Image (cartoon, rainbow, N blue to C red):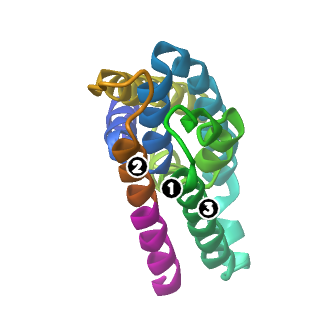
Amino acid sequence: MTLVETALASFALLLTPGPTNTLLALAGASGGARALRLIPLAVLAYLLVVLPLAVIGESLLAALPGLRLLLGLIAAAWVMLLALRLWRLPEAGTETRAVTPANIFITTCLNPKTFVLGLVLLPDTTAGLSLAAAALALAVTATSTLWVALGAALPSRHAHLPPVLRRGAALWLAVLSLGLAAGGLRG
């Protein structure tokens, strides 16, 4: 793929709802523009996982066939833990405890999109890895900004995020977790 095709494919993949995007939208809903400070962590996490995968991922997975299953189950467990934490928050206004910089970073590192990006999209580009990494960083920044803005645009009658939105995000994370676990066990 050309650099433009790689960038567009990365952007489209990153735009889809997933665990990181859910947390970014929730951060935007509860913190507004302050949530933009989380975006560099998402960019860093994607690059820290995707670049090594692009270079040695296929050979590593071939040498350790159970690694894909293990990583998928770890990701599923982490996302379910986030869902449970979010569901159990006692009151409105406590969402910031669920959307911490550490949670954004770890969730992004375990995001299944990193595997698609690192094993499929970046290795297939005809551009150099550094150009593809720059395009990926730009795509992550753009999509993360959109998700934060989407969250910030959610209507709220309260000074804090309504519990129904927090619980809805928790349910979505639980569904994603179950999907990750099922996918990991199938393949």
Find the distance from the CA under tag 3 to the CA under tag 2. Answer: 13 Å
Instruction: Give the residue pinned by disc 3.
Output: 81
Local crowd at mark 1 within 10 Å, few (<14), some, or many (≥20)? many
- Helix, strand or loop for disc 1: helix
Q: Nearer the viewer, residue 39 or 90?
A: 90
Q: Earlier in the sequence, mark 2 or mark 1?
A: 1
- Please state if 132 lies on the left or on the right of 81 as rendered: left
- Which residue appears at 73% of the width and 77% of the height? 63
| Above or below, 101 relative to 53 | above
Q: Are marks 2 and 1 in contact (CB under 8 Å)?
A: no
- Which residue appears at 36% of the width and 35% of the height? 11
Quadrant location, the N terminus = top left
Local crowd at mark 2 within 10 Å, few (<14), some, or many (≥20)? many
Local crowd at mark 3 within 10 Å, few (<14), some, or many (≥20)? some
Q: Nearer the viewer, residue 73 or 63?
A: 73
- Which residue appears at 60% of the width and 40% of the height? 46
Residue 53: x %, y % from top left: 64, 53
Residue 79: x %, y % from top left: 56, 59
Q: Are marks 3 and 2 in contact (CB under 8 Å)?
A: no
- Helix, strand or loop for disc 2: helix
Residue 169: image tag: 2
Instruction: Give the residue pinned by disc 1.
Output: 87
